[in-house]
Amino acid sequence: MPTKWLSEDKSLNLLSKSVYGRLATCGEDEQPYITPINFVLYNEKIYFHTGFKGRKLENIKDNSKVCLEVSSPGKIYSAPEARNFTMRFWSVLVFGKANIVHDDKFKLTVMNKLMEKHASEYKYPDLSIEDMNIVNVVEISIDEVTGKASVDPN
């Protein structure tokens, strides 16, 4: 199955349109931990919201290095032999560092961006600065983005 490496721009475009991804963290116990998250790409950084407790946050406090994966499966191609079956796909990996956002005004901006991305078809009251007391926002600074896709052979 031929694979094509995607440009950074194409990878970021796929990332920005993805509904959710899987965030890998690793704490002081060195055990990888993966969590599904919804997120938004804003100002060349990734943001997601979460609670105030949990393994994901403890891992980020111990080790800010993270990896976010987004992907989409495509068509399955059958073959006479199982070893020749294949599936089309694309995937994007982001390597970076995660930090908690403490500025409530900026958290409000990010939460509004998240709502625009994930809930624009719904009616709801505007978020307020007071709402930021009940949500935790995490920022991922992007160090590297890679993407690849399976392609049809020529």
Image (cartoon, grey):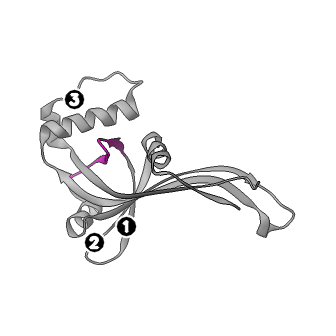
Residue sitting at x 33%, y 63%: 66
Q: Is residue 83 above or below residue 115?
A: below
Q: 114 above or below 91? A: above
**In the image, farthest residue toward the bottom:** 29
Q: Quadrant of residue 141?
A: bottom left
Say whether residue 44 is magenta. Answer: yes
Q: Are the residues at dot 3 and dot 2 in contact (C-beta closer than 8 Å)? A: no
Mark 1 = which residue?
A: 33
Q: Quadrant of residue 154?
A: bottom right
Count of numbered circles on the image:
3
Q: Which is nearer the N-term, disc 3 or disc 2? A: 2
Residue under label 3: 127
Front residue of 45 and 83: 45
Asked if disc 1 and disc 2 are in contact, CB closer than 8 Å, the reply is: yes
Q: List the residue tagged with mark 2.
A: 27
* CA–CA distance in space, label 1 to label 2: 8 Å
Residue 107 coordinates in the image, percent (x, y): 19, 40
10 Å neighbourhood of mark 2: few (<14), some, or many (≥20)? Answer: some
Q: Amino acid at mark 1?
A: Tyr
Which stretch did the figure color magenta?
39-52
**For the residue carrying disc 3, how many other residues have a C-alpha within 10 Å: few (<14), some (14-19), or many (20+)?**
few
Q: Looking at the image, is 84 positioned above or below residue 8?
A: below
